[in-house]
Amino acid sequence: MKIRIKFSKQGYMKFVGHLDIMRYFQKAMRRGKINIRYSEGFSPHQIMSFAAPLGVGITSNGEYLDIEVTDQDTPSFTSQTMTKSLNQVMVEGIQILSCRKLPDTSKNAMSIVCAADYTLRFRERAILEDLEMFFEKLSAFYSQDQIMITKKTKRSQRKLDLKPLIYHLERRGNAVFMQVSAGSGDNIKPELVMESFYESQNWEYPPFGFLIQREEVYGHDQAGNKIPLEEFGENIE
């Protein structure tokens, strides 16, 4: 049985990198007595994959990993009992939000990720005196037909129109909310959007000026609609 697990990552756990989170969940599966499947061969490992690695320093309410288990014929095995078992062995800062059964033919979360939601809040020391002016300029920035940037990687750099990769951007209170492209194609970080905005205003971008939180991760359903990865599965009753 394929299971998709949704979890949150808060507090000091935001400073723990992706590889260590992977190792942590491998141990948590054993401590939670989850009968996770192992690969075959000389070096068996747990069948587990994460949807989209989260950058260090970013909190999240919508992280996902897929596993395979062998409990499908156990009457006591439900979404509720699995969530409870895992939460009993979670460290402070990580909470299991749901465990859902996936169709046998479903692709893993990593391969279907297409978008992600983020909320950016000003750190206390970085709050601007004129927030109204800031958000007016941000709205004008997003209203442009094109947002051309130079995207740099370790090996190269290329010109890129950022506008079609920002699916939504708006003010929510004194925070910035955005939905951007994610996944194996054009993976756009919220920091890149804000850096581009600051550069367009000839402002110096504060690299630690925002508290960033990922809210949700999406994939395309068969009709091509973006839906939360959680909704590809169903509760085990």
Image: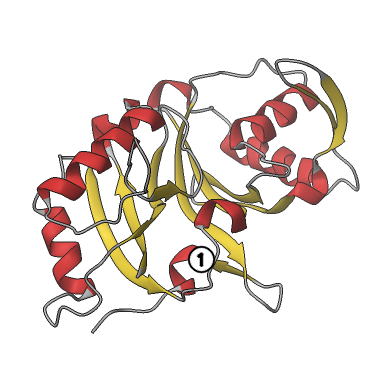
Q: Report whether residue 223 is seen.
A: yes
User: Looking at the image, which is closer to me, 143 or 16?
Assistant: 16
Q: Quadrant of residue 205?
A: top right
Toward the front, the furthest residue is 42
- Mark 1 is surrounded, within 10 Å at the Cα level, by few (under 14), some (14 to 19) or many (20 or more) other residues, namely some
Q: Specify whether 151 is left or right of 131.
A: right
Q: Residue at x 26, y 42 (%)?
A: 25
User: Looking at the image, which is closer to me, 135 or 59?
Assistant: 59
Image vertical order of residue 229 relative to residue 208, above or below = below
User: Looking at the image, which is closer to me, 101 or 171?
Assistant: 101
Q: Residue at x 29, y 34 (%)?
A: 23
Q: Specify whether 186 is left or right of 236.
A: right
* Total marks placed: 1
**What amino acid is found at the position of numbered circle 1 in the picture?**
Pro
Image vertical order of residue 18 relative to residue 74, above or below = above
Q: Which residue is mark 1?
A: 228
Q: Residue at x 25, y 29 (%)?
A: 12
Q: How is the image coloured?
A: secondary structure
Q: Specify whether 21 is left or right of 122.
A: left
Q: Quadrant of the N terminus?
A: bottom left
Location of residue 86 in the rendering, given as x and y in whole percent from the top left corner: 16, 55
Q: Residue at x 51, y 58 (%)?
A: 108
Secondary structure of the residue carrying numbered label 1: strand
Location of residue 107 in the rendering, given as x and y in whole percent from the top left corner: 55, 63
